[in-house]
Amino acid sequence: MPAHPPLVLVRHGESTGNADGLFCGVLDVPLTDLGRDEARQAATLLRDASIDPDLILTSTLQRSTESARIIAGALPGRPRIVAAQWRLNERNYGALTGLSKSAVRAQYGADAFLEWRRSMDVRPPALSAAAFAQLHRSAAFRGQPAEAMTETESLRDVVHRLQPLLEERILPALEEGETVLIVGHGNSLRALRALLEDLGDAAVRDLNIPTGQPYLYDTGPSGTPISRSGRYLDPARADRAAITLAHEGGT
């Protein structure tokens, strides 16, 4: 183990929405069997690296919370604090939520498709009033503050909503000597890496986060990473998965 506690980011295992090629966003879909295997493999990588998280933070969406439960259950030793945080939720894709990526690309063209998926500032069309009301009633958002509910988001919006969590929960926990594991989503982890690594827009646009691959930062006494970039615990497999994602339009 490093002298100071590490910070580890991992994207949830494959969900049914991933398998079906959908714009998942805030759609609350479960893991596939492959996704559950990916979560168990992530736990194995953590165990083999002697990483024992004290605090596990998830989103309120079940693909994140289920992945965290699988990981926590597969690690040896003491109980861990698992806390759901709405700020870690996936980006809200607005009216694209639940639609097939290939169908959206065919209907609107490659340029619009890539701007909606990869740009920092372009928001997709907003959810309808009926869809927004349905989202408000869903289990993942029940009891959450009003600011957790949006009609659509850009990636920069996600960066802005994650910053308070980083400054008020993640970094203080690391500074207090806790090893922190974040089980998030493709875009919430892109946003978090943008903050941790001070990435420019072009670098974030090209960043792809594979499912189930732990990404580790060594930290200093203040809890901040000592390097502007972290490292995957299984870099060869993570790199292959990231290349596949890039060919599919990225996540």
Image (tube, rainbow, N blue to C red):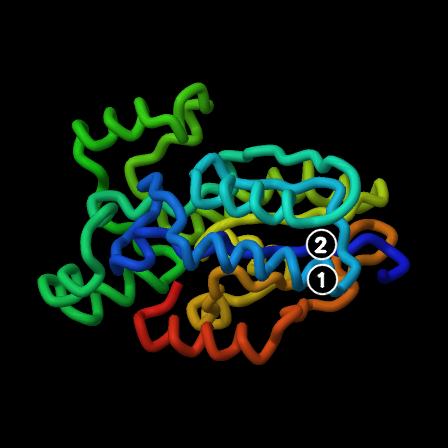
Question: Which numbered circle lies on residue 14?
Answer: none
- Mark 2 Cα within 10 Å, few/some/many (few <14, many 20+)? many
Is any atom of residue 248 visible in this view?
Answer: yes
- The amino acid marked with disc number 1 is Tyr
Residue pushed farthest left?
107
Residue occupying the point 71% across, 47% down: 180
Disc 2 marks which residue?
A: 7
Residue 3: image location, x then y, percent: 90, 59
The number of numbered discs placed on residues in the rendered structure image is: 2
Residue occupying the point 21% across, 70% down: 111
Residue pushed farthest top?
143
Residue 238: image location, x then y, percent: 54, 73
- The amino acid marked with disc number 2 is Leu
Question: Which numbered circle lies on residue 217?
Answer: 1
Element at label 1? strand
Quadrant for the C terminus, please.
bottom left
| Camera-side residue of 87 and 19 | 19
Q: CA distance from mark 1 to mark 2?
A: 5 Å
Residue 59: image location, x then y, percent: 50, 39
Residue occupying the point 40% across, 54% down: 33
Quarter where residue 165 is shown: top right
Quadrant for the N terminus, please.
bottom right
Residue 246 vs residue 185: left or right? Answer: left
Residue 32: image location, x then y, percent: 38, 52
Tag 1–tag 2 contact (CB < 8 Å): yes
| Camera-side residue of 40 and 249 | 40
Residue 155 vs residue 175: left or right? Answer: left
Looking at the image, tell me whether mark 1 or mark 2 is earlier in sequence order.
2
In the image, residue 136 sits, relative to residue 179, either above or below, namely above
